[in-house]
């Protein structure tokens, strides 16, 4: 297996928090290492998401991985009288159906971080993590979050099985980690599903082996009865289709199924030569060729039905789930009340109002009413203590603009590792008219909507104004049929 160093790095800033997230990307090559993958290799682009967090004050490592844009060389099983062999084929020549069954399994990444330890401003530590059950090309792996002990978390950089002590690991975590490099620690080509699907779903190998039976039949016909079909049979077995595939790509399963069906019918005719053509008394060679055909037929059916690929079935690799961390909070309705809940420990933190929301693990409190001073407040609170961290007021009146009512609404909240964005709308409504009767009654307003996009500290990123007319239901009391 060839291991190459990361080509592209996208890394998080060294900010200490309950959770740390890192985006990784690169291009690498993995080579086959066992008989069924020998001389095979794959070049591919890959991405990985690393999340580090705490659960009950213990470290949790979660790594997911995907790979795509494959190129290289694979193997396909070939049946021979001496057993299996594994000739190679370019990956690009496989059918689309087979290309997606090429897998990488056993993938582990070694990530190198810079941190502050023992008063030193820059020290390197390594972290090795398993990506879990890999998917088909283009799909994310199903990672199994791990929770190593603190003294088995970080390795001394560049050393095998030499871990930094517990207190040192905790210090590095607290001081923050900056990703400086990553490489493949382990990975293997896995053609288990590729070979299984090829043998069970394609008749390509059946056609190849029937060529052996055909050669024996035409030899038997010639030796027993002087019937020479060599280079004369218009339906003869041919290598031309295999040679064409090596240049243009493998034919799909339906094409091979039709070829084998037609060729089996031709073989059946050759194996049932009319009695009037069986001249002379040298019947042995032909009889042996017919017997060989039946044996090859039986052997192919048995081998195909009972075929088992070498290696590990990817479906047997345990799939994982999203990691649980301390300090990853959710607002949930419990009974008739709303609570901030730690999603990792399921602990209820404290009760909140229905209109409260979370902004990058901080509690935001808003009001939809304009106060007497003509402003609407928006406040950021500490999750644990409910102490106010940020309080800002936004005007809900506009100079020289008359309004019958004004209110504020939160239309969008986007939480992200690089900062949150929320869209806060302040609506000034001017009554125009009422139309309709009874349950069809609608009040018409002309709205002027001030749209503020704010960052996680409630600073204005951008501002825009939208104007337009709207109608809102305004039911009236009706008597009789109205």
Image (spheres, rainbow, N blue to C red):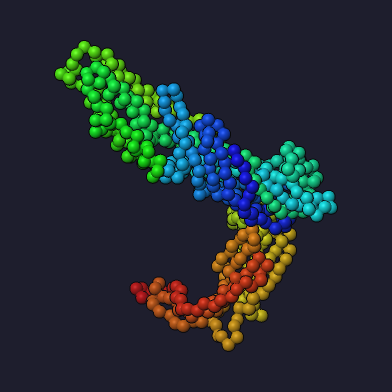
User: Can you tell which quarter of the image residue 184 is in?
Assistant: top right
| Residue at the right extreme, as displayed | 119
The residue at 74%/40% (across/down) is 159
| Residue at the bottom extreme, as displayed | 400
Q: Toward the viewer: 141 or 35? A: 35
The residue at 77%/47% (across/down) is 170
The residue at 74%/63% (across/down) is 387
| Residue at the left extreme, as displayed | 276
- Residue 474 visible in the picture: no
Image quadrant holding the N terminus, namely: top right
Residue 295 image position (x, y, % from top left): 34, 20
Q: Is residue 205 left or right of residue 320?
A: left
Residue 351 image position (x, y, % from top left): 66, 58
Q: Toward the viewer: 232 or 290? A: 232
The residue at 62%/57% (across/down) is 331
- Residue 471 visible in the picture: yes
Q: Toward the viewer: 413 or 113? A: 113
Give the number of callouts.
Answer: 0
Q: Relative to 479, does residue 264 appear above or below in the rendering?
A: above
User: Can you tell which quarter of the image residue 332 is in?
Assistant: bottom right
Residue 231 image position (x, y, % from top left): 27, 30
Q: Relative to 407, does residue 128 appear above or below in the rendering?
A: above
Image quadrant holding the C terminus, namely: bottom left
Q: Is residue 98 left or right of residue 457?
A: left
Residue 320 image position (x, y, % from top left): 58, 42
């Amino acid at each position: 297996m060839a291991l190459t160093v990361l080509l592209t790095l996208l890394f998080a800033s060294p900010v200490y928090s309950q959770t740390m997230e890192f985006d990784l990307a690169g291009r690498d090559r993995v080579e086959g290492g066992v008989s069924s993958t020998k001389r095979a290799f794959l070049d591919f682009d890959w991405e990985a998401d690393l999340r580090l967090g705490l659960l009950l004050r213990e470290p949790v490592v979660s790594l997911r991985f995907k790979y795509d844009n494959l190129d290289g060389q694979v193997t396909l099983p070939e049946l021979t009288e001496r057993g299996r062999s594994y000739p190679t084929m370019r990956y690009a020549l496989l059918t689309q159906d087979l290309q997606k069954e090429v897998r990488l399994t056993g993938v582990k990444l070694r990530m190198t971080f810079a941190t502050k330890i023992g008063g030193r401003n820059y020290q390197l530590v390594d972290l090795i993590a398993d990506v879990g059950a890999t998917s088909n090309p283009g799909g994310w792996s199903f990672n199994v979050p791990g929770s190593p002990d603190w003294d088995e978390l970080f390795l001394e950089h560049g050393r095998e099985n030499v871990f930094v002590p517990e207190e040192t690991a905790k210090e590095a975590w607290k001081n923050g980690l900056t990703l400086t490099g990553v490489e493949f620690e382990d990975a293997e080509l896995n053609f288990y599903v590729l070979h299984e699907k090829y043998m069970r779903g394609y008749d390509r190998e059946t056609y190849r082996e029937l060529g052996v039976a055909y050669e024996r039949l035409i030899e038997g016909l010639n030796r027993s009865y002087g019937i020479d079909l060599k280079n004369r049979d218009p339906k003869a077995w041919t290598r031309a289709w295999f040679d064409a595939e090596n240049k243009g790509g493998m034919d799909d399963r339906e094409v091979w199924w039709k070829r084998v069906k037609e060729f089996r019918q031709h073989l059946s005719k050759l194996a049932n030569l009319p009695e009037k053509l069986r001249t002379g008394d040298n019947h042995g060679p032909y009889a042996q060729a017919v017997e060989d055909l039946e044996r090859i037929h039986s052997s192919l059916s048995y081998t195909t039905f009972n075929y088992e690929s070498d290696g590990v079935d990817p479906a047997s690799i345990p799939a994982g789930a999203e990691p649980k961390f301390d300090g990853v909070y959710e607002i949930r309705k419990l009974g008739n009340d709303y609570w901030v809940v730690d999603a990792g420990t399921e602990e209820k933190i404290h009760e909140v109002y229905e209109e409260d929301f979370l902004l990058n693990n901080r509690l935001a409190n808003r009001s939809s009413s304009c106060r007497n001073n003509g402003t609407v407040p928006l406040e950021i609170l500490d999750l644990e203590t409910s102490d106010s961290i940020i309080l800002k007021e936004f005007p809900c009146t506009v100079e020289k603009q008359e309004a019958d009512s004004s209110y504020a609404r939160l239309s969008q909240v986007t939480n992200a590792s690089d900062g949150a964005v929320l869209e806060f709308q302040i609506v000034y409504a001017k009554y125009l008219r009422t139309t309709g009767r009874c349950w069809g009654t609608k009040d018409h307003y002309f709205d002027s909507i001030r749209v503020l996009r704010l960052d996680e500290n409630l600073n204005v990123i951008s501002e825009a104004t939208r104007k337009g007319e709207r109608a809102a239901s305004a039911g009236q009391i009706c008597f009789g049929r109205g």
